[in-house]
């Protein structure tokens, strides 16, 4: 009887263990496509009593995950998150700049270089017939297309920066969710361990949360002796230890080219990403957020700097030429673009000619002013008011020099002659009295509003510079191509461009410099695409290796399940045999009694 009891106990233990193994195998097959799920094994040991086997016991359910391989996958996931984000944003940035060619061989591309070339073509046509109003309008429209494209591209860059800032805020929310999930799983794992329950599925969920976290920011982690998975930044700031430490971030309300992140600064701009009051922005160097920070604070501002350098040089060069000319008929008044006051020092030499001219271009009055005689702008204003008949000079409420002609139908014209003011600019150029372009950077550059609207003409004529012009004679060369040729020479000739946004200092034409900006962005986009492909391959390789090592192999599990079913059947039959033997023994005992 004792032997049969032992045999029955052994059979039942085998049946029970097989049931658990079948359950585990079934769960493996069912979760084969579940993200982060790893192959589970029911661990069993032999029971031995007095040196004799007395069955088996399932000691737990576990999965074999290579910890080093998992760490490699987590690192590759961070790299892939950064590469994916950089690729997406740089593709959008490249699209902002337009194409250098068109699908149609008969049409031009849409890049800044193409727009500048179109302006040059319009000037060439105008030079053949300077008085043609339609050709003047075409030239103005072509220049407006250039400045508008600079504005739109600049606006697009700042929108990308604003989007990156919003994406950082959104990612911080997701990061905090992952940190809390890891902390909650730590607590559950400790609870299940204390109760003697399997924690394998909970550990899978925790590993998946770590990978999700790593996709957004680079982290380091390890499992403490109490079973907690502790997570830190690259410099050791705790994100999860005995509890979760959420990140804090406030996105900017608006983003312009001047909006910047300054570590430790409380001034307006981009805020820092903090944990328990500690700024960890500089510690996030990879993952989605790491790439967003780099894009927002480096890549996109560099692109803006390149555009600003182009815009500043274009405005400066074009205005230097347009201030050599005058419109026909001349405007009643000229308002400068430079901010001055009556006490602004005037460092100037040479002579400038101011003239009052009627609508037909005939001289009414003029004055040649020796600029070396005046030490400040106020003295110059007084000299003009006392020495030039028919011209009133003043400084308006905005701090701009104004020259106004008196007399119905009269206007003001300037010839810069030998004047040199400040750093060597001509008189009109220094004060910006005949500027064709307004604005100081890519976001503000524009064609002067009165010229764009048609209220004023292009300053393409020149005021007579002969020694003694006679009142009543024509002094405006409206048919001259001097200014137009100078504009073309400025655009196609060599201009010195300073180092900007990663582009080295260079001497080039405006079209060539614009083309180099477009090429620079295209190169970055191509490099980002290649990096993304490489990081995707690396991450996929690690993921495949981990899956091969700890993932579910359905064929193996199906074969294993079949074997387990046979074992279960055998154990069941053994129990039936033992039960039959028990019945026979009881019958025999009853008959002898």
Image: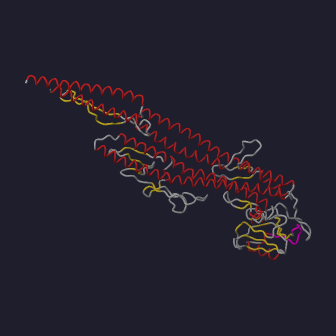
Rendered location of residue 375, percent (x, y): 74, 72
**Residue nearer the viewer, 392 or 96:** 96
Above or below: residue 357 compared with residue 202: below
Render colour scheme: secondary structure
Q: Position of residue 538 (x, y in %)?
A: 51, 37
**Range shown magenta:** 359-370
Taking the magenta stretch, the answer to whether it contains residue 361 is yes
Provide residue 47's location: percent of width, then percent of height: 23, 31
Q: Could you say which is closer to the camera, residue 592 or residue 167?
A: 592
Would you place residue 3 above or below residue 242 in this image?
above
Q: Count the numbered circles shown.
A: 0
Q: Quadrant of the N terminus?
A: top left
Compared across the picture, whether 60 is left or right of 533 comes to left
- Asked if residue 568 lies in the magenta stretch, the reply is no
The answer to whether 71 appears left or right of 49 in the picture is right
On the image, which quarter does residue 314 sit in? bottom right
Magenta stretch: dominant secondary structure: strand
Return the residue nearer the eye: 478 or 196. 196
């Amino acid at each position: 009887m004792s032997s049969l009891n032992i045999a029955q106990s052994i059979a039942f233990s085998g049946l029970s263990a097989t049931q658990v193994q079948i359950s585990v195998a079934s769960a493996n097959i069912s979760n084969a496509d579940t993200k982060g799920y790893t192959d589970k094994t029911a661990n069993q040991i032999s029971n031995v009593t007095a040196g004799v086997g007395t069955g088996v016991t399932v000691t737990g359910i576990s999965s074999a995950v290579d910890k080093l391989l998992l760490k490699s996958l987590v690192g590759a996931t961070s790299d892939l998150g950064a590469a994916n984000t950089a690729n997406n944003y740089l593709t959008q940035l490249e699209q902002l700049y337009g194409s250098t060619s068109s699908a149609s061989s008969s049409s031009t591309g849409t890049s800044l270089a193409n727009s500048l070339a179109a302006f040059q073509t319009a000037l060439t046509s105008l030079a053949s017939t300077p008085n043609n109003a339609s050709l003047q309008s075409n030239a103005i429209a072509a220049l407006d297309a250039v400045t508008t494209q600079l504005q739109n591209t600049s606006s697009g860059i700042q929108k990308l920066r604003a989007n990156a800032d919003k994406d950082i805020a959104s990612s911080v929310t997701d990061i905090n969710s992952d940190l809390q999930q890891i902390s909650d799983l730590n607590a559950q794992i400790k609870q299940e361990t204390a109760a003697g329950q399997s924690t394998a599925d909970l550990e899978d969920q925790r590993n998946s949360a770590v990978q999700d976290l790593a996709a957004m920011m680079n982290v380091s982690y390890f499992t403490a002796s109490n079973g907690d998975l502790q997570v830190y930044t690259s410099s050791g700031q705790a994100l999860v230890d005995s509890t979760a430490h959420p990140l804090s971030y406030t996105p900017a309300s608006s983003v312009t080219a001047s909006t910047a992140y300054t570590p430790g600064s409380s001034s307006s701009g981009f805020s820092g990403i903090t944990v328990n009051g500690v700024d960890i922005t500089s510690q996030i160097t990879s993952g989605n957020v790491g790439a967003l920070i780099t894009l927002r604070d480096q890549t996109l501002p560099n692109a803006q700097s390149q555009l600003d350098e182009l815009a500043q040089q274009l405005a400066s060069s074009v205005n230097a030429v347009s201030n050599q000319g005058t419109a026909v008929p001349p405007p009643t008044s000229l308002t400068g673009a430079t901010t001055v006051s009556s006490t602004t020092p005037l460092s100037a030499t040479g002579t400038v000619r101011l003239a009052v001219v009627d609508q037909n271009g005939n001289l009414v009055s003029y004055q040649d002013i020796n600029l070396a005689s005046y030490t400040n702008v106020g003295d110059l204003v007084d000299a003009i008011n006392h020495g030039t008949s028919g011209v009133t000079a003043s400084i308006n409420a905005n701090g701009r020099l104004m020259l106004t002609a008196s007399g119905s139908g009269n206007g003001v014209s300037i010839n810069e002659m030998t004047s040199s003011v400040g750093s060597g600019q001509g008189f009109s150029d220094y004060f910006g009295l005949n500027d064709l372009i307004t604005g100081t950077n890519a976001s503000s550059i524009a064609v002067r509003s009165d010229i764009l609207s048609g209220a004023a003409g292009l300053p393409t004529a020149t005021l007579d510079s002969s020694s003694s012009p006679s009142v009543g004679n024509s002094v405006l060369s409206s048919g001259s191509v001097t200014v137009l040729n100078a504009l073309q020479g400025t655009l196609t000739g060599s201009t010195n461009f300073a180092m900007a946004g990663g582009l080295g200092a260079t001497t080039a034409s405006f079209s060539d410099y614009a083309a180099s900006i477009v090429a620079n962005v295209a190169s970055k986009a191509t490099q980002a695409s290649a990096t993304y492909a490489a990081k995707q391959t690396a991450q996929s390789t690690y993921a495949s290796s981990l899956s091969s090592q700890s993932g579910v192999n359905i064929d193996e599990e199906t074969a294993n399940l079949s074997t387990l079913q046979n074992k279960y059947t055998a154990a069941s039959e053994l129990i039936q045999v033992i039960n039959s033997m028990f019945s026979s023994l009881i019958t025999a005992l009853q008959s002898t009694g």
